[in-house]
Image (cartoon, coloured by chain):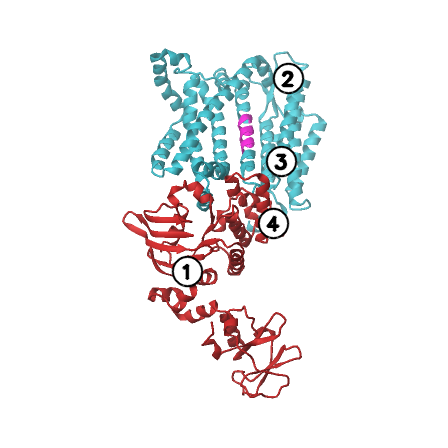
Chain colours: A cyan, B red
Amino acid sequence: MPTSDAASARLVANRVLVTLLCAGLLAAWLLPFATMSPNRLASGQTVGLSEALSAWQVIALLALSAVLAVTALRRPLPRELAHSVVLLASLGLLLITLYSLGDYAQRTLVEKSPSARVSQGSAFWVMVFCCALAAIDAFQRASSGWLLRLGYMLIAGGSVAMLFASGHFDDLSIMREYANIRDNFADQFITHLVLVGSALGPALLIGVPLGLLAHRRVRLQGTLFSVLNFFQTIPSIALFALLVAPLSALGNAFPLLGEWGVKGIGAAPAIIALVMYALLPVVRNTYAGLKGVPPATVEAARGMGMTARQVLWRVEIPLALPVMLSGLRIVTVQAIGLTVVAALIGAGGLGAFIFQGLGQYAIDLVLLGAIPTIVLAVIADFTLQMLVVLSKPAGTRR
Amino acid sequence: MIELQGLTKRYGETRVVDDISLTVEQGEFCVLIGPSGCGKSTTLKMINRLIAHSEGKILLGGEDITTLPPERLRRRIGYAIQSIGLFPHWRVADNIATVPRLLKWPASRIAERVDELLALFQLDDEGLHDKYPHQLSGGQAQRVGVARALAADPDVLLMDEPFGAVDPLTRDTLQAELARVHRQTGKTIVFVTHDMDEALRLASRVALLNAGQLVQYDRPAELLVAPANDFVRDFIGRADLGLKLLSRRRVEAYCRPAQRTRNNAIASAPITWQVDADDRPMALLGGRLGESDIARTVVNTEWTATPEMSMKEALSRMVWFRVTALPVLDGEGRLLGEVTMSGVMGHRS
């Protein structure tokens, strides 16, 4: 075995890509690409890839797969070029997979009853997933600058958005579901963003000064971090539930507070819980960022005659910023996910569709809640990653 | 002028600096030296109030330093530490401009001053103006650190082991450069180090500290010829005390007239230099160790001396090339005189 391992290592430069490619192709061959059902709730029959796709689509899929297979080899492409080719080919594969599904829905539903539905099969999901992972992997291997990454993400996001905007997917089951709830979807989407935003604001306003305090007063650290750690260990659903009773009591005791929205259910307990979860990463990263500033740099700043405030704003914060922003990144992604659960206590947001869909066993509705949440989290993660890079002292950023 | 009067720093019951009194005159290069934990760094940092003193007084130009807010005081005093003290997120020019900006100088004056300092430290022709500290070599970073300390043209410069983190070769260059800058600017400098050679090379006065107390405060030469006690002798390095002394002295103090001849006939003196028409030495007659007195040794450019050379180096060359005398040459290579092995013992100064 070791010899054959060594042999494949010489031949194949990127094993991750090979694995993803095999998984994608196997799924395309063995698993259903789409399902077809007579109405919204009935379970349908499966449709394979060869049946769903037109000839040119299959050829394009195979051609791009072949390109990917070549890039995974040690030769003939140089590494840097191979990464760029992978990025483009996987985006191409993703777009063709998406396009083919919409195209299939358009072609078949013309001849069926209006209530018939076409939805995504497991092969579709595996293929989309593999494309995304191949692109992420290529990003990690390539040494491209942040501007190129931003450009790629904009092109990828833009082309997918254009497919949606053109109405190409309107015949898919999930988009029909979307058409039914369009107005409500916009509301809940905004509610979701508002919840996340109103949790992050206070979390930063409280967390950054606390991190500063932890850095300045060594004795406070132990207590502060154990309290914040304790919050983190409470399961989210339990924390939401625990907040219901005291907040409703508060709202009842002081009607004025009740008018301001302090109630047992709704946004108030959700925001409070989200803030409590967000505090630990914010405080910890603020503290770690400040601690990472070399003591000699701070001493030099003081020795030059900077006031304590000037040392903080001109030296400590700029140097701690990358680590502080990494904290914000963790917190933002975490809050976007936790807000889904907040729908259970009536706070609204995209979670509302997920729980509603689970109740009705309407899987499209669940996806309408889940997919935008994932996309939001990915966008937030990517944006903040960019900010982390940009906040690094000039000249040291990659 | 800096006066320390009964300066003491206590942490609880421990006195890390214990009743130190000394005066650093205008334009003096004062080196604080001593073993680790002797309180030299603490003493330095009390001068710009990075550390508050417990007892005693510090006068800067006759003025008690506690009468000023600490930030205002520090902007009047240059401060340089090891290169990691540069602000990594600022370019070289911004680093140098730190104090002028705090003092709110107009931008044009700051730019002018930065260029002036880059020129003074010979950093101007290397395109360093817009570089970041991590792009500099150790020596460059250190020079930027000193330039930054001088930016607002302070009368007094405090330096805390500034050359501690650079390699010996670079340190040598930096020391020579600092000595030159000191001569050119006439600043009062207080410099902390634990390296005796560095202290002897740079200082006009050395303050030797031990366990928080001032043991001896003297000119380097006095420290060497009249050490106050055994601690001083040990710290300087008892074994090469004599060599350290020679390292402070220059060849010109030992130079004496040379016996010349234009042909290779043996003269009456034991050491005679054969010179050409331009008075350049060609050979040494006699004076070769282990050879007979009549040996003729061709002068090699490597075993010559200049008036500015330290006697330590001259002696080292004599030993290495196995000769008992070196010709002392002027800038044109003409024979000024000679230094001899026996002459090392007594000098005219």
- Name the residue type under label 3: Leu
- Spatial CA span between label 2 and label 1: 89 Å
- Are dots 2 and 1 on a single chain? no
Residue, x 47% and y 79% (percent of image)?
A: B342
What residue is disc 4 on?
A: A7
Q: Is the stretch drawn in magenta largely helix, strand or loop? A: helix
Specify the subunit that label 3 lies on. Answer: A
The answer to whether the residues at label 3 and label 1 have Cβ atoms under 8 Å apart is no
- Name the residue type under label 2: Asp
Mark with earlier residue (4, 3): 4
Query: How far across and down, in percent of the image, does residue B318 sit?
Result: 52, 76
Specify the subunit that label 4 lies on. Answer: A
Mark with earlier residue (2, 3): 3
- Spatial CA span between label 4 and label 3: 38 Å
- Name the residue type under label 1: Val
Asked whether, in this view, residue B52 is left or right of residue B116, the answer is left
Residue A171, which numbered label? 2
Residue A147, which numbered label? 3
Residue B206, which numbered label? 1
Q: Residues within 10 Å of mark 1 (few under 14, many from 20)?
A: many
The answer to whether the residues at label 1 and label 4 have Cβ atoms under 8 Å apart is no
B59 or B40, which is in the foreground? Answer: B59
Asked whether, in this view, residue B240 is left or right of residue A118, the answer is left
Residue farthest front in this picture: B62
Q: In this view, does A117 lie above or below B172?
A: above
- Spatial CA span between label 3 and label 1: 56 Å
The stretch in magenta equals A375-384
Q: How crowded is mark 3: few (under 14 residues within 10 Å), some or many (20 or more)?
A: few
**SS of the residue at dot 3?**
helix
Residue, x 46% and y 74% (percent of image)?
A: B347
Mark 3 or 1: in front is 1
